[in-house]
Image: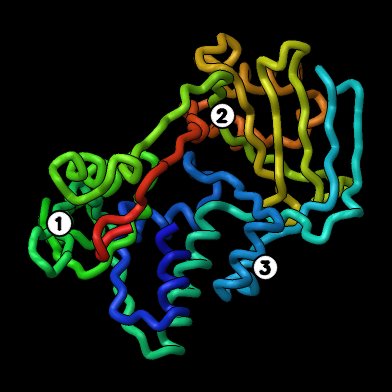
Amino acid sequence: TGLATALMLLRRGWENITIYDRLASDDLKEEQSDFRSKRSYNIGLNGRGQVALEKLGAMERIKRYSIEVRGRKEWGPKGTEVEEREFTDRRYFTRVLLRNTLVQCLREEVVAQAEERGAGVNFVSGVECVDAEWDHDDSNRVTLSFEGRGGDATSPSFKGTFDFVVGVDGSASSIRNAMIRTQQMGFNQQPRDALCYTNFEPSNTRVYRTLLLDLPEGWRYDVNYAARGDRDREILFDALPLDDKTLLGAVLSRPGNPKMQNLTRESARELIHELFPQFGGMVSDESLDEFASKSDSRLPEFSFCDGSLHRLNSTV
């Protein structure tokens, strides 16, 4: 993420760092305080992720808000064929927390480390980078074009010129696209070094909706619970802990599955009791209403970049 990049730069002695974020700060606070948000979901940090965050100095803060997962319990169709595993041979246990909690932890860590080092860090929220241009002189500076999305944006669109830019703007990266476009206009890259982008067509597309569950007495909170709703794996369920009393589950299905269309509280209840009866008593009316009213969310698609990932001395 951009916040992790800012931590890396701070630890290497950089100052006067500005972080531009498409998400408005008010949206982040709202989602952070309300884990029922349509966009909220749990992130699992495996050993490699924890090692990276330890090197950035952020892991201790994240540990305060995350939970270790020490086992997995999985059911076959309609609550049958139970399989349980206890993780005993792992150096690192996966730690889970809400995506927005992770963002907030990293943001707090950026502020803390900047203050400790006397470095300036500025956050500009609610803006999106839509294009990039590079100077053709010896300055190597890059000019970014931004569009306001609310938040801190003072105008609908504006530009800024920078000595160094790291583009951490997602799979639809405007900075990457500008680098690919302009390398075809004589920016000294050899053909073997040309930046290219490949997006893999999904072969097993799934969509999901989140569902909040209250853990009954006797159920462990440090376990990943999973279930198959049918033999063909058309509808799946997976849940990770929010805290010691609550699970955040995801019901995964193929796009357009008729059982997931036009849901109401009652039809959602029938769906859960039919496919996942072991979880039926854990879902409140409020959670069912939220589940039924949500639209399907898509999982990330796989893609990668190859070739030269930098432009001159100013952009990565």
Distance from the alpha carbon under mark 3 to that under mark 1? 41 Å
| Residue behind mark 3 | 63
User: In the picture, which quadrant includes the C terminus?
Assistant: bottom left
* Circle 2 residues within 10 Å: few <14, some 14–19, many ≥20: many
Q: Name which residue lies at 84% across and 56% down.
A: 90
Image label count: 3
Residue 74 percent across, percent down from the top left: 83, 32
Q: What residue type is labelled 3?
A: Lys
Q: Nearer the viewer, mark 1 or mark 2?
A: 1
Q: Which of marks 2 and 3 is nearer the N terminus?
A: 3
Residue 24 visible in the current orientation: no
* Element at label 2: strand
Q: What residue type is labelled 1?
A: Trp
Q: Earlier in the sequence, mark 3 or mark 1?
A: 3
| Residue behind mark 2 | 208
Is residue 72 found left or right of 137 in the rendered image? right
Residue 6 visible in the current orientation: yes
| Residue behind mark 1 | 134
Is residue 210 found left or right of 279 in the rendered image? left
Q: Which of marks 3 and 1 is in front?
A: 1
* Element at label 3: helix
Residue 228 percent across, percent down from the top left: 76, 22
Q: Which of marks 1 and 2 is nearer the N terminus?
A: 1
